[in-house]
């Protein structure tokens, strides 16, 4: 199979970091804060590399949109086994307001330019939790989508995707080219091996601007404010189940 | 694969090359996710982390400096020191297992082995499937390595080894050892040669596992050689070269000098883990109405702990870079090992103090770091020996 896979990787604040809201409440503090690849993007990269190792796809291309720092994220994907990278340069205000709609336009344009047969993305990013980019990209390309994938198999020239849905698992068969978004149980991402980290240094990362792809990254959304979640209140202990039911009724919960 | 082969100036030590940052991060991630959660249990069970060693082998960490052609990662010594520090931060025992395999077992064979020996004794030990060990010390001599009394006698086309080696790290889990034995006691240290012995092997038996204060997941025991026969081809290097292979003396990249840096890196990992523990606690524990991190007494401790660790780290990196540049690094390696091991014991001691009662119980890792740290001042050259090495080098520099 001569398939080319595009994998989107997003640079986000590391999952273990305690998030702090900026004093002006326009966003969260990112300066000097540890960033890493979005965990669901790691799963996406792993799946693409596994497909390549099974010789079901020929080339894995890692894509990231953002300022200079996202090159670290692309390199991590290269160290995991991606063949080359594409850095779509977006910085400053444009980067602050970059969201799923613009990213999916970029990915759609790249998919056409690179003649990709498959796009694998994480199901959502852990910073904005949008869960939209995969779906929007598929719609823009008019490609089928297999979202929340916990299993992906290529059979002939079709994709069999097992999806995690409310109430269980759904298996669908879709035509290629397609968009797949990775869910938690799809795989366990590998640690980059030292030899692969060395090889990653030699792999190419191409630079491209959204304008080159004919994409306007201006946002149609305006963030009004960002707040911390309300402080967790202390609980109340009750003596009996009867009391518990009463309290819940009082609070309008049942 | 060092960027530029000259020794970088000290200001460049602040920012590691991208390659090194990436591999440091991958080791840190592995240590945090796979080692730290099991370290306490491994210590309690005195259990060799076989699964983790295999995973580390697959990552290339069990043979960092070994060229790719032989199955290693083909990276430099700085990368190796970074790897050992990060792994030791998660589990000090795993750190020493990795260090011994890299520095003490693979190191001398890489440097002094024939092509045939390298294929046989290096490649299978790069994957994590097999680990090696290094048998120099004896019950009768540790620091005084030249006084080795293990004998090697030639009988036809075999060497016959007899004697006892002591304190051998990894030996209960190893598949081969580099053993030092003398062919002529009258020649003292010039009579010592190095030999490669597979394990298990007839004539080689292991003493009981030592019940240690710390690094309990790594095995330590005697190796007893009784009429242990090996082919002539199992001699490593030339006859009488054993002491040089083990020590220093005009050959760059000598084993113990390099091993010293591996232990320095391990000590740094332990110090850092203890500092992490104490700093975290200082935020969370309140006393007199505020987190104890607000108290100057605690702040001064944390500052001293961080300073000791960071200073030792820079010394370690500098020594590693000198080695990578193929420059003499004996004095610098001794300084690094001395500084790092004393930092580890100091920092872990203070960490218990910061934690108070909680530092004394197994609920928190501080007590394990304290126990793990202690050996770093002893093995691979005691602090006293390090001081002698440094002093000798200083005096040589000032030779009249």
Image (cartoon, grey):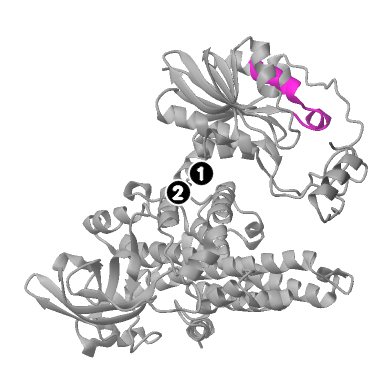
* Residue at position x 63%, y 66% in the image: B272
* Residue at position x 71%, y 28% in the image: A89
Kind of element beneath mark 1: loop
Above or below A44: residue B97: below
Q: Are marks 2 and 1 on the same chain?
A: no
Residue A94 is covered by the magenta coloring: yes
Characterize the local packing of mark 2: few (<14), some (14-19) or many (20 or more) Cα atoms within 10 angstroms: many
Residue B14 is covered by the magenta coloring: no
Above or below A50: residue B331: below
Q: Which mark is residue A192?
A: 1
| Nearer-the-camera pick, A33 or B186 | A33
Quarter location, residue B374 = bottom right
Which residue is farthest top? Answer: A142
**Magenta segment main secondary structure:** helix
Kind of element beneath mark 2: helix
| Nearer-the-camera pick, A107 or B314 | A107
Q: Is residue B301 left or right of residue B100?
A: right
Q: Which residues are magenta?
A: A90-109
Above or below B276: residue B160: below
Give the labeled residue for mark 2.
Answer: B59
Q: Is residue A232 left or right of residue B35?
A: right
Q: Label 1 near label 2: C-beta < 8 Å?
A: yes
Residue B136 point in image, percent of width and height: 33, 78
Quadrant for the C terminus of chain A, please: top right
Chain letter for the residue marked with disc 2 in the picture: B
Characterize the local packing of mark 1: few (<14), some (14-19) or many (20 or more) Cα atoms within 10 angstroms: many
Residue B328 visible here: no
């Amino acid at each position: 199979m001569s398939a080319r896979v595009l994998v989107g990787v997003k640079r986000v604040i590391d999952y273990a970091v305690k998030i702090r809201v900026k004093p002006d409440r326009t966003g969260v503090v990112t300066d000097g804060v540890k960033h890493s690849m979005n965990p669901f993007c790691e799963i996406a990269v792993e799946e693409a590399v596994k497909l390549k190792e099974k010789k079901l796809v020929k080339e894995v291309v890692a894509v990231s949109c953002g300022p200079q720092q996202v090159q670290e994220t692309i390199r991590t994907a290269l160290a995991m086994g991606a063949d080359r990278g594409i850095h779509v340069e977006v910085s400053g205000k444009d980067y602050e307001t970059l969201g799923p709609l613009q990213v999916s336009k970029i990915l759609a344009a790249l998919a056409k330019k690179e003649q990709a047969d498959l796009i694998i993305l994480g199901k959502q990013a852990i910073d904005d939790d949008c869960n939209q980019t995969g779906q929007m990209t598929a719609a823009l390309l008019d490609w089928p989508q297999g979202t929340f994938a916990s299993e992906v198999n290529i059979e002939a020239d079709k994709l069999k995707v097992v999806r995690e849905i409310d109430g269980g698992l759904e298996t669908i068969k879709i035509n290629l080219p397609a968009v797949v978004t990775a869910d938690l149980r799809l795989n366990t991402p590998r640690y980059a091996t030292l030899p692969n980290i060395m090889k990653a240094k030699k792999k190419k990362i191409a630079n491209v601007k959204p304008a080159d792809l004919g994409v306007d990254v201006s946002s149609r959304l305006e963030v009004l404010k960002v707040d911390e979640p309300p402080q967790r209140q202390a609980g109340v202990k009750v003596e009996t189940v009867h009391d518990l039911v009463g309290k819940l009724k009082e609070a309008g919960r049942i | 694969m060092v960027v530029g082969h000259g020794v970088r100036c000290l200001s460049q030590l602040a920012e590691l090359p991208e390659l090194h940052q990436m591999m440091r991060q991958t080791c840190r991630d592995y240590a945090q996710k796979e080692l730290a959660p099991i370290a306490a249990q491994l210590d309690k069970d005195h259990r060799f982390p076989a699964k983790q060693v295999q995973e580390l082998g697959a990552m290339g960490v069990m043979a960092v400096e070994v060229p790719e052609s032989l199955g290693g990662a083909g990276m430099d010594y700085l990368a190796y020191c970074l790897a050992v520090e990060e792994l030791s931060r998660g589990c000090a025992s795993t750190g020493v297992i990795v260090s011994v395999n890299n520095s003490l077992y693979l190191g001398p064979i890489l440097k002094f082995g024939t092509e045939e020996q390298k294929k046989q004794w290096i490649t299978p030990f790069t994957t994590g499937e097999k680990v090696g060990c290094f048998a120099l010390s004896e019950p009768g001599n540790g620091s005084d390595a030249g006084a080795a009394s293990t004998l090697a006698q030639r009988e036809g086309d075999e060497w016959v080894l007899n004697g006892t080696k002591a304190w051998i790290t990894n030996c209960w889990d190893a598949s081969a050892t580099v053993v030092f034995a003398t062919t002529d006691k009258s020649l003292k240290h010039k009579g010592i040669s190095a030999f490669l012995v597979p394990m298990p092997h007839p004539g080689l038996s292991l003493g009981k596992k030592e019940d240690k204060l710390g690094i309990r997941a790594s095995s330590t025991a005697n190796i007893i050689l009784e009429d242990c026969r090996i082919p002539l081809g199992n001699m490593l290097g030339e006859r009488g070269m054993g002491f040089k292979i083990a020590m220093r003396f005009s050959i760059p990249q000598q084993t113990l000098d390099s091993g010293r840096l591996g232990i320095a890196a391990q000590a740094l990992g332990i110090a850092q883990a203890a500092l992490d523990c104490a700093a975290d606690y200082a935020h969370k524990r309140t006393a007199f109405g505020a987190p104890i991190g607000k108290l100057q007494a605690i702040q001064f401790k944390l500052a001293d702990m961080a300073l000791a660790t960071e200073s030792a780290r820079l010394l370690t990196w500098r020594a590693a870079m000198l080695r990578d540049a193929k420059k003499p690094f004996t004095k610098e390696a001794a300084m690094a090992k001395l500084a790092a091991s004393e930092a580890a014991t100091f920092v872990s001691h203070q960490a218990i103090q910061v934690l108070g009662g909680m530092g004394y119980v197994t609920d928190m890792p501080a007590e394990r770091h304290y126990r793990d740290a202690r050996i770093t001042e002893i093995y691979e050259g005691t602090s006293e020996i390090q001081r002698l090495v440094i002093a000798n080098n200083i005096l040589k520099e000032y030779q009249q």
